[in-house]
Image: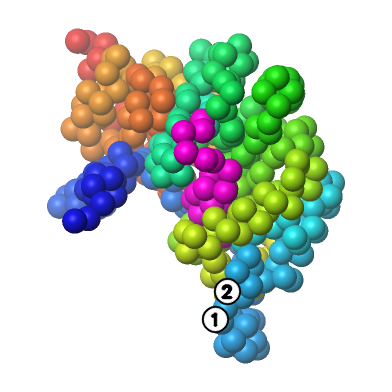
């Protein structure tokens, strides 16, 4: 017989994917321009020109073995050196190529790191709201998910709640900033407080508690907001990074894991990551895009496009009476549903062809996520429907 747990995961997609698939079917029925899809974080901003130039140059001038052959299991040495140099130039973290493991995007980075760290029944704390797949990744590594509830309104971390959730079984904490789904950037005061609690608890329980920084949205920050680099605040840190959002390359599946050289037993942690990658079949990230990343390490997308979308949407929805969390980064707007049940709100919005994501599975009930990484015209065209929805609730 097949694995019942895997069947359950395969037979019921995540809420995001369910809505995404519904959108494709609905668009085929009535036309894509009539469906206001805000379901999935698929970057709408083009990849930087450097990416296309690098691909063209590589295909014309490099050998097929370099482009399409195997690299080392942990990734091409030159690419890992380029990644380490970039981290050190920007953040002074002191990493080397031997702290870097190239991966198939952030999902692989997280899955590998959790498998490397967690023993059966050890706990991993996640800060609500959190990306829904964290639960899948942690439980697949035989760990237990513990949810820390946020501060109301600001959605910064509630330090007292967080500290109360740590037990002797706590092995890891995942921090995602800028946050999916809220767009909140955890400020330096919050970061310092979290790290102080972790250091205290490490001493109390006499074992490391690892901080996993999930950073696919690090580069997508507005209004000169700074995102603290967690390795510089807490030694036992592992960074999981993806170029999916930073370079608009979600389908290419390229990212990395960086282990802090200051972590306890950092060499052993890195070897455990290599072993986890091997056991999961995540060896040798896509060769062509390792070479592309090596050549385009400093490239950036034009985030002003996302900022304009944010400002249009946030301004209009708050004017219509929606309560929204002001996002400092990523490309999501976290909106309080106009009734307690976010799924019922979602169904009413769907009747007006507005597709948003109910966030109960993100650990916070009564909210929906709007992904504004779409063409600006879609937002403009959707505003009358959002307004009509708000008025419908007011009238009822």
Residue 272, above or below 147: below
Q: Give the residue number, with chain letter if any, for mark 2.
A: 287
The spot of residue 127 in percent (x, y) is 53, 26
Rendered image quadrant of residue 15: top left
Q: Residue 121 magenta-drawn?
A: yes
**Residue name at image x 39 percent, y 15 percent:** 321
Label 2: how many Cα within 10 Å (few below 14, some 14–19, many 20+): many
User: Quick one: label 1 or label 2, which is nearer the N terminus?
Assistant: 1
Q: Determine which of the numbered discs, if any, sits on residue 68 in the image.
A: 1
**Residue name at image x 27 percent, y 18 percent:** 341
Return the residue nearer the eye: 184 or 193: 193
Label 1: how many Cα within 10 Å (few below 14, some 14–19, many 20+): few
Provide the secondary structure element on which disc 2 rests: helix
Mark 1 touching mark 2, by CB under 8 A?
Answer: yes
**Residue name at image x 32 percent, y 42 percent:** 14
**Residue name at image x 33 percent, y 34 percent:** 356
Count of labels in the image: 2
Q: Residue 147 magenta-drawn?
A: no
Q: Which residues are magenta?
A: 103-123
- Can residue 396 be seen? yes
Side of 296 relative to 112 (left or right) = right
Residue 153, above or below 183: above
The spot of residue 256 in percent (x, y) is 62, 56
């Amino acid at each position: 017989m097949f694995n019942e747990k895997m069947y359950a995961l395969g037979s019921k997609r995540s809420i995001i994917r369910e809505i995404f698939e519904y959108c494709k079917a609905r668009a085929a029925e009535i036309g894509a321009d009539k469906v206001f899809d805000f379901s999935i974080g698929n970057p709408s901003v083009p990849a930087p020109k450097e990416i296309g130039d690098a691909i063209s140059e590589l295909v014309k001038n490099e050998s097929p073995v370099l482009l399409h052959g195997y690299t080392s299991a942990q990734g091409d040495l030159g690419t890992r050196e380029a990644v380490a140099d970039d981290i050190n130039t920007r953040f002074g973290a002191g990493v080397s190529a031997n702290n870097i493991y190239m991966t198939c995007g952030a999902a692989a980075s997280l899955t590998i790191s959790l498998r490397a760290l967690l023993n059966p029944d050890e706990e991993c704390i996640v800060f609500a709201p959190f990306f829904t797949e964290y639960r899948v990744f942690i439980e697949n590594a035989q760990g237990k998910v513990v949810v820390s509830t946020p501060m109301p309104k600001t959605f910064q971390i509630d330090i007292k709640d967080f500290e109360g959730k740590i037990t002797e079984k706590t092995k890891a904490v995942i921090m995602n900033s800028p946050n999916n789904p809220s767009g909140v950037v955890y400020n330096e005061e919050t970061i310092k407080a979290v790290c102080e609690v972790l250091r205290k608890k490490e001493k109390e329980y006499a074992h490391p508690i690892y901080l996993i920084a999930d950073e696919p949205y690090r580069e997508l920050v507005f209004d000169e907001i700074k995102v603290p680099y967690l390795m510089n605040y807490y030694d036992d840190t592992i960074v999981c990074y993806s170029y999916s959002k930073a370079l608009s390359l979600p389908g290419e599946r390229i990212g990395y894991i960086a282990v802090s050289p200051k972590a306890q037993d950092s060499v052993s942690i890195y070897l455990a990551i290599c072993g986890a990658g091997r056991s999961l079949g995540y060896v040798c990230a896509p060769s062509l895009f390792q070479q592309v990343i090596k050549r385009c390490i400093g490239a950036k997308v034009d985030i002003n496009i996302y900022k304009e979308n944010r400002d249009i949407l946030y301004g209009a929805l708050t004017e219509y009476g929606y309560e929204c969390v002001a996002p400092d980064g990523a490309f999501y707007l976290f909106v309080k549903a106009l009734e307690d049940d976010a799924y019922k709100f979602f169904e009413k919005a769907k009747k007006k062809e507005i597709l948003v994501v109910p966030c109960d599975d993100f650990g916070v009930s009564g909210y929906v996520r709007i992904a504004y990484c779409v063409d600006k015209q879609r937002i403009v065209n959707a505003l009358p429907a959002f307004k009509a929805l708000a008025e419908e609730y007011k009238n009822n």
